[in-house]
Amino acid sequence: MSHRTVTALSAAAALAALALVVDGVPGASATLTLSGPAADTSADFNNNGIQATADGSVLVVAHSGQGALNLVDPRTGASTTVSGVSLPNIDGFLLEGRTVYAVQNFLEQITVVRLSGDLSSGSVTKVITSGSFGVPATVARFGDRLAAVNAHFDTGIPPSSPTYEVVLVDR
């Protein structure tokens, strides 16, 4: 049985896909050339977090420079922007069904977005903050809570913080 991991090439209008087998041995790689809004590489940071829908038919891609979520066809690379949602400083995110937990790193918050049935639009339902955030970069589910990873980009790039933390917050 094989699985695929997809990585954003932030400075290129492309996504890289690497097939992995169950035991972790790398398989064949491929590059998906993007078109539409996800192909925009005019900012310092562009495509970033990526999540596939449960059926794999759509890739949801965070575009830091646009402050947007883009939907990418994994076969063609064609993309459209999710309307109704502005996410400045978006970095990593978690997709659970039609709910997005979007990390906005320098705003030090996680914005919860509910997507429409076809994913083409969304609306903000909640903003999660914590005094323990230190420019979080990504988020994962940890039981019934969220785990955000502090990147400390406020110390420079690359970060120079002596410590890095995972912060647990309620969903």
Image: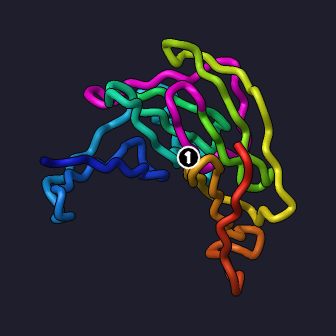
Residue at 70%, 68% in the rendered image: 153
Residue 10 screen position, x and y as percent: 48, 51
Is residue 92 a member of the stretch shown in magenta?
Answer: yes
Q: Is residue 64 left or right of residue 70?
A: right
The amino acid type, in three-letter code, at marker 1 is Asn
Q: How many marks?
A: 1
Residue at 66%, 76% in the rendered image: 164
**The C terminus lies in which quarter of the figure?**
top right
Image quarter for residue 137? bottom right
Highlighted range, magenta: 74-99
Nearer the observer, 18 or 12: 18
Residue 33 screen position, x and y as percent: 32, 37
Q: Badge 1: few (under 14), some or many (20 or more) residues near its Cα, within 10 Å? A: many
Image quarter for residue 121? top right
Q: Is residue 151 left or right of residue 155?
A: left
Residue that label 1 marks:
46
Q: Residue furthest right?
A: 131
Residue 128 screen position, x and y as percent: 79, 44
Q: Is residue 165 left or right of residue 127?
A: left
Determine whether 132 is above or below 30 in the image: below
Residue 114 screen position, x and y as percent: 64, 24
Residue at 56%, 50% in the rendered image: 141
